[in-house]
Amino acid sequence: MDGRVKVVGQVECVDGASLTYAEFVDRFMAPNRPVVLTGLTASWRACEDWTLPGPGDRRRPDLSFFARNFPSPLVQVADCSSREFTDQKRLEMSMQEFIDHWVGDAHGGSSAGDRESSLLYLKDWHFVKEYPDYVAYTTPTFFVDDWLNMYLDSHPIHRDSDIANHKNEINCSDYRFVYMGEKGTWTPLHADVFRSYSWSANICGRKQWLFLPPSQSHRVFDRYMRSSVYNLNDDVSEKLFPEFNKTEWLECIQEQNEIIFVPSGWYHQVHNLEDTISINHNWFNAYNLHWVTTKLQKNILKTFEIYVMILKGFANGTWRLIQG
């Protein structure tokens, strides 16, 4: 970031190996506060298989391992230079195509300007669903009370092989993802889907996070609460977003082998400061269920309002035709 936002504090960092579940609930989950947890990934297979030694004790992505062992037919990739509605433009390509692009960037396959404008970020890869026999990691105890993914895993479509073989992407999806991106890739400002919790573990690389408390979330929206700020690095229009200059942010530099807990309703923007691989889950439970139900109720109401507007439009058009 270049000073366009006011950072007033840092996200707390805690040794997760010495933290009890009850302490996590009391200090972070129940009060809905972000935290960085260390000491929880030492036994993960992904930390060894997916990385190579780098400078010092740093690790770097082993891209050839992915090409050899996880030849997904198609992966979803975000073009970090191209906006589409409220998110980055999404592309589909094979894992090999994605890796070839990444390696080409690293070896100067295009000019510096071209590489910057074509940074691709693999997102929302349903790794657990695609490779269930490869146990890359174990969900930390703090996050196992996961009503969202437990429900999706138990959905009837997963027990009916004839239906499941059709690969229905909507019904067969989960909210457990792998992200892979080279230095400079990023994710625009957002709050997580359904206002769920999320956790994100860096297998290698470093990320910068900027967090805005829910009490200030209205300040990243326009006066009509219809559109929000897309990129904190842009010059944010005071005319369009008159409250934005009042926002106060928490910052976090997440290192490799650290896990960050993202509470409900916290808007955040994330930048990869190094080539990075991360594992990410969205989930909810009793502690944030009210956030989820409120969000879904608002979405239903908004859908109903749009539906009524469409019906009124049809009715007015039909009446004009009758009068005509």
Image (cartoon, rainbow, N blue to C red):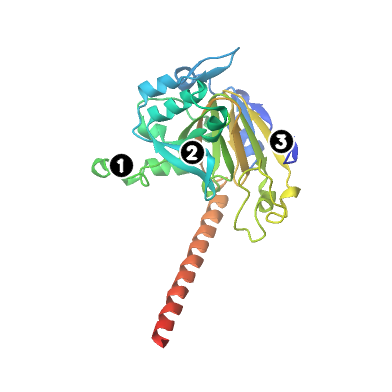
Label 1 amino acid? Answer: Lys
Image coords of residue 281 (percent x, y): 50, 36
Residue 169 seen anywhere in this rendered image of the structure: yes
Q: Give the spatial CA distance, label 2 vs label 3.
A: 23 Å
Q: Residue beneath label 2, please?
A: 78
Q: Nearest to the eye among marks 1 and 2: give it.
A: 2
Numbered circle sitting on residue 126: none
Q: Earlier in the sequence, mark 2 or mark 3?
A: 3
Q: Nearer the viewer, residue 305 or 33?
A: 305
Residue 145 seen anywhere in this rendered image of the structure: no
- Residue at 47%, 26% in the rendered image: 102
Q: Residue beneath label 3, please?
A: 2
Numbered circle sitting on residue 167: 1
User: Few, some or many C-alpha atoms within 10 Å of disc 3 (few <14, some 14-19, many ≥20)?
Assistant: few
User: Few, some or many C-alpha atoms within 10 Å of disc 1 (few <14, some 14-19, many ≥20)?
Assistant: few
- Residue at 67%, 53% in the rendered image: 218
- Residue at 61%, 28% in the rendered image: 273
Q: Give the spatial CA distance, label 1 vs label 3.
A: 44 Å
Q: Nearer the viewer, residue 181 or 323?
A: 323
Q: Quadrant of the C terminus?
A: bottom left
Describe the element under mark 3 as helix, strand or loop.
loop
Label 2 amino acid? Answer: Ala
